[in-house]
Image (cartoon, coloured by chain):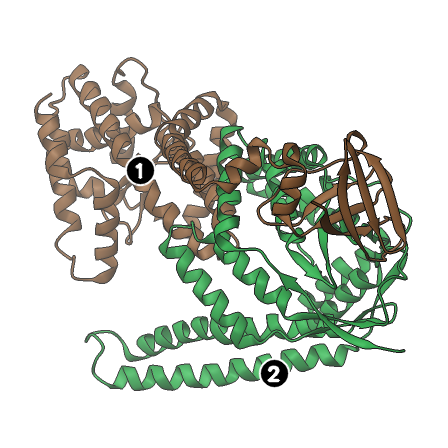
Amino acid sequence: MTDRQYQQFHFTGRGGEYFRIWIVNVCLSIVTLGIYSAWAKVRRNQYFYRHTLVAGASFDYHGDPKVILKGRAIAFLMFAAYSVVSQFNPAAGVAIFALIMLAMPWLLVRSLRFRLHNTSYRALRFAFHGETGQAYVNLLLWPLLSFLTLGLLWPMAQQRIARYTRDNSAYGDVSFRFEVGVGEYYRVYLMAILIVIANFAAALSVAILLADSGLMPAGVERTALIGAIAGLGMYVGIFVFVYPYVAARMQNLVWNNTSLADHRFVANVKASGLLVIMLGNLLLIVFTLGFYKPFADIRLARYRIEHLNLLAYDSLDQFVAGMQSRTSAAGEEMADMFDFDVAL
Amino acid sequence: MPVTAVYFDGQQARRHEVMLSLDGDVLLLQGDAVERRVSLSALKIPPPLGNTPRLILFADGARCEIADNQGFAAMLPHAAASWLSGMENSWLYAMAALLLTLVLAAVAYLWGLPYAAREVADRLPDYVLVQMDNQFFASLDQTLLKPTALAPDRRQALGERLQGMSLPPGGVRPNRIEFRGSPGLGANAFALPGGSVVVLDQLVDLADNDEEVIAVLAHEMGHVSQRHAMRQMLQASVIGLAMAWYIGDVSSLLAAAPTALLQTRYSRDLERTADAFAADMLRINGIPVSRLADMLRKLEASHRPDATKTEKAELMIDYLSTHPNTEERIKSLRGR
């Protein structure tokens, strides 16, 4: 029987439950002057992974807090050195930043290795086998080329990044496969540009209507007023329409073209759903002085995870354990500290 | 009471539905195509984490996931909880942790950070300070500041008079005193983090005599002596980093706003200290302390008349929030 069956990913975490874990984590991290933060990270990851279920089994995280603490210490010292030096001598700060940027692909490879090696499902580990040389091409050269072409090559760079990270990831002994042309990426961004243009036209007309309505304070120059209102409209529009659209489309695009052996994935994240959650989260975090953060994390995770399906071909029993390599956490913690991330 | 669980052998992804039961201190695992008897001491049972499935980890990499948390706790009561999971599961502890976090954050902000900033600022070597101010001048001269329009002999006279004055205990002379013009900033003088003092032309024009300029410079030297600007800058960097870390996910724009708000508190305390220093220095050198009070009144008035223009209004708000109430300062200076 060749059964293709949908297995929805489920997320069973709850805001109240996670809030208690989060606040205990924050409190113990402060009391121990940051040392506990490594244990806190493991607990947070375990909470989210173990609450993520598909096909009757949950994920798990196995990072060793002591290894993470070591990585964090190295990353913190580097970051502190960078901050202090750039404060006193901006030129040296720029040089150090350039060096760190140059090391970024190397760090990201280590980060991915650590993260995937320490993730398991059904008692089998994930793995990352990407080579560092390839990382320089895909994670540094392509983004750099897209920067030099004023973003014209950015969709291409994104496709290369996704292909590199997915093709080199494995579950057990089976590699993920990522197959999609660059055209699909350009389609998403073309649509985004059309939204930006429509947004600009709308913001400009509203600004002109407002400026001529006589509701505005007198004595302010008309063009400056129109510029200010239209600028605000663009800012809000990009946050409200463009960002959720691109984020939703990218998640769907990446997952819908990822396969693992004969199994496929189906993601159906909607821009409107993502917008409601992100906007609500942002407002509530601001109004609660940040204490809504754990609830916000849970809401976003639930939305993203529950809109992902595994399209399983036959059973999942065929996977067997793969070879594992040694990993260290320094790369991951460095990447975290300097805010590098590659979405998986 | 047997408990249902799913079992994975760690070699293959196959899911086995099993029943768990205890036989003394041996765990019995029975199900489709699998049967194991393992002593409890050879197993790892992680403490609970929220409502996530409970786990049993075997030495060979196999694992059990148990969704029935209550059944599991009833079967293995001694593995039911740890002090940590107990804390995480209780709203009472959560609220206590919340309270403690808020108190610690307040203590760190009110005392810890100013103390640390002072300790670090006092230990910075001079060449770092000089280097820093060079950087500041390089960028300020390109943006906010213009060359001074004051006559060279006036500048020299003011500089020499200041050099000739004696300092109160602990006083330090500025690395440099620089005169600059700046249409945007109005009548003002300020100390840079490295210990240089910038005097703007409008301030000199506003003063009726040199003693009033000296009084303001004495106030700035109070800032320089205690490295106030450096301490402020260090504190601002730490708060900025903490804010960026805390709400960095949301938006770095949001992180900047509270940082600016939190910063004003330090300034008020430091202004009072600088006033006290200036009063001491003026008295030692036989200049009436009222010169500073007079100058403060004039400065306030000079920033007020054009308050209708938005640009000036912003400056005014800025000036008010970072300086203690002028009347209060004048009163306290008169009392000296």
Q: Are marks 1 and 2 in contact (CB under 8 Å)?
A: no
At label 2, the amino acid type is Met
Q: Which chain is brown?
A: B
At label 1, the amino acid type is Phe
Q: Position of residue A57 (x, y in %)?
A: 74, 57
Helix, strand or loop at label 2? It is helix
Q: Position of residue A124 (x, y in %)?
A: 83, 51
Quarter that holds the C terminus of chain B: top left
Residue marked by disc 1: B190
For residue B149, say whether it is visible: yes
In the rendered image, the vertical position of residue A219 relative to residue B221, given as above or below? below
What is the crowding at mark 2: few (fewer than 14 residues within 10 Å), some, or many (at least 20)? some
Q: Nearer the viewer, residue A229 or A192?
A: A192
Q: Quadrant of residue B22?
A: top right
Which chain hosts label 2? A
Q: Nearer the viewer, residue A274 or B213?
A: A274
Residue marked by disc 2: A191
What is the crowding at mark 1: few (fewer than 14 residues within 10 Å), some, or many (at least 20)? some
Q: Position of residue B45 (x, y in %)?
A: 71, 37
- The residue located at (52%, 76%) in the rendering is A272
In the rendered image, the vertical position of residue B161 relative to residue B2, given as above or below? above
| Image colour assigned to chain A | green
Q: Position of residue B54 (x, y in %)?
A: 67, 45
Q: Is residue A195 left or right of residue A151?
A: left
Q: Nearer the viewer, residue B195 or B232?
A: B232
For residue A151, say whether it is visible: no
Q: Is residue A178 left or right of residue A86?
A: right
Task: Identify the residue at the far front of this view.
Answer: B1
